Amino acid sequence: MKATSFTLQRQEGRPMKVVVLGAGIIGVSTAWHLLERGHEVTVVDRQPDAALETSFGNAAQISVSYCEPWANKDAPLKALKWMFRDDAPLLFRPQADWRQWRWGLQFLAQCNDAAFERNVQQLVALGAYSHTALKDVVNATGIEYNRLERGIAHYYTDQKSFDTAGEAAALMQKYGVARRVVSTAELLQIEPAFRAFAHSIVGGTYTASDESGDARVFTQALAQRCIARGAQFLYGHDIERLEKAGGAIESIAIRARTIRGKGENLVHLKADEVVAACGSYTAPLLRSVGVDLPIYPGKGYSATFRLLKPELAPFVSTIDDEVKCAMSRLDTHLRVAGTIEVGGYDLSLDTPLARARCKMLADRIEQVLPGVCDTRLESEGGTPSFWTGLRPATPTNIPFIGKTRVGRLWVNAGHGTLGWTHGAGSGKALAELISGEVPAMNFGFYGLKRPAATARTQTA
């Protein structure tokens, strides 16, 4: 069933009460931009602070130029070959869950060149818009978050894979992103830290305009500035249910996590508008009121290693094509993140599979940057910080940003691995939509009727 189209009507001078569900980078960015437009904002999250789930330990990249969807013509065969590898970059773990299989079929439908380019165009448009929005927020607030404006590099260790790098760079250039192919020698001039691994590198690509920084630090600082501007943050509260009446959201029932009782312990929040920005948990929440979006969790991993030799560590955020992991310097530590498991809502780190994937990150960094980080596992006396989080993935990798067919209910979710890259712009765009404005970018907003030439249809 398709989302009901809606017409934006300006409501200048009319501040609204808006409840934002979720305090990750998407929810907090939405709250900030709503405040900028004069609205009254309440944010609800089950954690004791902002950015403690999906936004907590990501790869730290603002990667406008490296936004390729998972779905491409080579993905089905690769996914099939990787199904029995514990350290596979993309691992489909079949579950007794028909929604996973539906998501998988929709994903396969996107694995062709036409869909790939169409999806890239959307992702680049949102990325460029978001990068500008992030810079505006940083300039306005002065937030510091271990930001490095050194670009993003991508190196290849396989000649066949590198031979396709020019096509990917050309596609990005077509949509205004200055991603270029570089030789091994030029890559080492851009980032000398990889000299010890140079014998394995056959070439790479580089985009100077990209950057990196700590999403958790940024989001928590922005949340504090939201509070200073009058926003209310209800941390430590579970969202029990959305309460609907007459085709619209009447209230949101929440409960403090410290309260174990039922009934009278519920708090019913009322608002003019409600924004669902709960990452992977957005899908089951919206299904409870009849909105069924194909958002499925992809379990990602990261490791944060203490630098033993800071002078030899990279400053340029980098992607390792062979194992599909990204590394970013965060002051005295190196963040390494990668691998995706499409296998439900499991967040365990102590299973054999999870341990194998964490070990892969440690082993790869030791191979690429020998002796630079403390990559020893805890059992070996080391102190790495391993983390896992659920990436809210759509079959296209394009998020749902817009108004649902349920009155007063908006959605800002489905950003996959690009939540940090697209966070500031997604928050600004949704705040504009709620305020009766149309964001100035060529993007198919959910539920918004656009001219046929630019419209993107998603199902719900």
Image (spheres, helix red, strand yellow):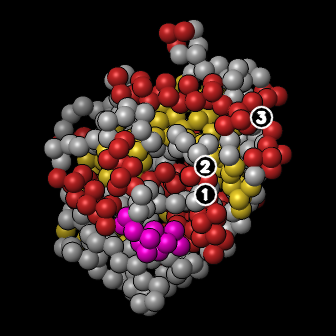
Instruction: Say which of marks 1 and 3 sits in front.
Output: 1
Q: Residues within 10 Å of mark 1 (few under 14, many from 20)?
A: some
The verdict on residue 406 being magenta is: no
| Quadrant, the N terminus | bottom left
The answer to whether 120 is drawn above or below residue 89 in the figure is: below
Q: Distance between the residues labelled 1 and 3?
A: 22 Å
Q: Which residue extends farthest front?
A: 160
Q: What element carries label 2?
A: helix
* Residue at screen point 29% across, 80% down: 4
- Dividing the picture into quadrants, the one containing residue 318 is top right
| Quadrant, the C terminus | bottom left
Q: Is mark 3 on a helix, strand or loop?
A: helix
Picture coordinates of residue 390 (x, y %)?
40, 43
- Dividing the picture into quadrants, the one containing residue 328 is top right
Q: Mark 2 points at which residue?
A: 159
The disc label shown at residue 163, or none: 1
Q: How far apart are marks 1 and 2 (CA)?
A: 6 Å
| Magenta part of the chain | 110-121
The answer to whether any part of residue 420 appears in the image is no
Q: How far apart are marks 2 and 3 (CA)?
A: 18 Å
- The residue closer to the viewer here, 385 or 249, is 385
- The residue closer to the viewer here, 341 or 73, is 73
Cβ–Cβ below 8 Å for labels 1 and 2? yes
Q: Horizontal placement of 448 versus 229: left or right?
A: left
Cβ–Cβ below 8 Å for labels 2 and 3? no
